[in-house]
Amino acid sequence: MTPEPVIEVRNVFKSFKAVEAVKGIDFQLNKSEFAAILGPNGAGKTTLVEMIEGIQKPDKGEILLWGMSWKGNETVLRKRIGISLQETRFTDKLQVWETLKLFASFYELRTDRVQEILEKIGLEEKRKSYVVNLSGGQRQKLALGLALLNNPSILLLDEPTTGLDPNARREVWSILKDLRENEQTSMILTTHYMEEAEQLCDRIIILDHGKILRSGTLKELLDNENLSGHPFSAAAPKNLDELFISLTGRHLHE
């Protein structure tokens, strides 16, 4: 069966004055596929994702979601995607359920959808807690809940588990895995955790200096990688972390 693309990035470039942030990137995301975009700081990840989200416009090339560009289709596309940023800002004096209800009103959703999301993200017991009193992990779950309210077909998540303890991180992973298995959601994820990319994603895209260095499943990347003569390569990589260092000369957190 031919894969059904939901996102197509075609020869995209983006510069900010003298800085070339994205340099001719091509890839597609298929229905029900989870892809991780990995890269050190300054690699171009945020710029690329913001263009996919419709926040930035490419200088050259095109980005299509379900075959549609953002120009002239913004209202339709906004209803079909969910976005969760690394540092989502909340109104501290609203309760959890009030926050979800407020955002649900933007999509003209019924109150029972708020209840569904509370149960899905595991915050039912915190429904009447003020946001200011939530832990970091609970705030991240709430941010994810807001992204899921409109039952999006595509999720765009920017470092959704940064700063979470291992248990909270795995709870978020469980939510995301359930979406892929039961709702055929597609997802692009940026992360600084190699294990997160390995656990969640079908495909891994390694980005540096505005270009895609490698793209494929973890097995493909490790099995097919030939780094002979690469300036940072000392031996064949045994895992994703070693591959990343071999390609970029840096750790992911640098």
Image: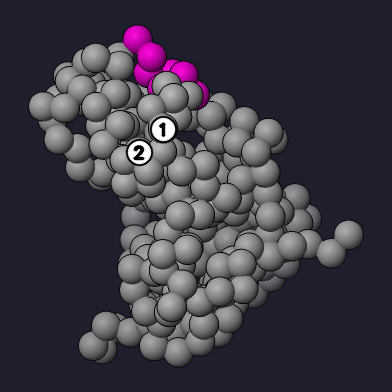
Identity of the residue drawn at 55% across and 35% down: 176
Q: Residues within 10 Å of mark 2 (few under 14, many from 20)?
A: some
Whole-number angstrom distance, CA of label 1 to CA of label 2? 7 Å
Q: Is residue 14 visible?
A: yes
Closer-to-camera residue (200/107):
107
Closer to the camera, 250 or 51?
Answer: 51
The percent position of residue 76, horizontal first and vertical second, equals 47, 63
Against 165, residue 80 (above or below) is below
Mark seen at residue 104: 2
227 lies above or below 82 = below
Residue 58 in the image: state x and y as whole percent.
Answer: 41, 82
Query: Residues at badges 1 and 2 in contact (C-beta under 8 Å)?
Result: yes
Q: Quadrant of the C terminus?
A: bottom left
**What is the crowding at mark 1: few (fewer than 14 residues within 10 Å), some, or many (at least 20)?**
few
Residue type marked 1: Arg
Q: Amino acid at mark 2?
A: Ala
> Horizontally, is 126 left or right of 53 in the view?
left
Where residue 110 is drawn, which disc sits there?
Answer: 1
Judging depth in this view, the residue of 61 and 116 nearest the camera is: 116
Residue 108 x %, y % = 37, 43
- Front position among marks 1 and 2: 1
Q: Quadrant of the N terminus?
A: bottom right
Q: Is residue 229 above or below residue 180?
A: below
Q: Which badge, 1 or 2, is on the more N-terminal residue?
A: 2
Q: Magenta residues?
A: 118-125
Residue 158: percent from left, percent from top: 39, 50
Q: Label 1's element?
A: loop
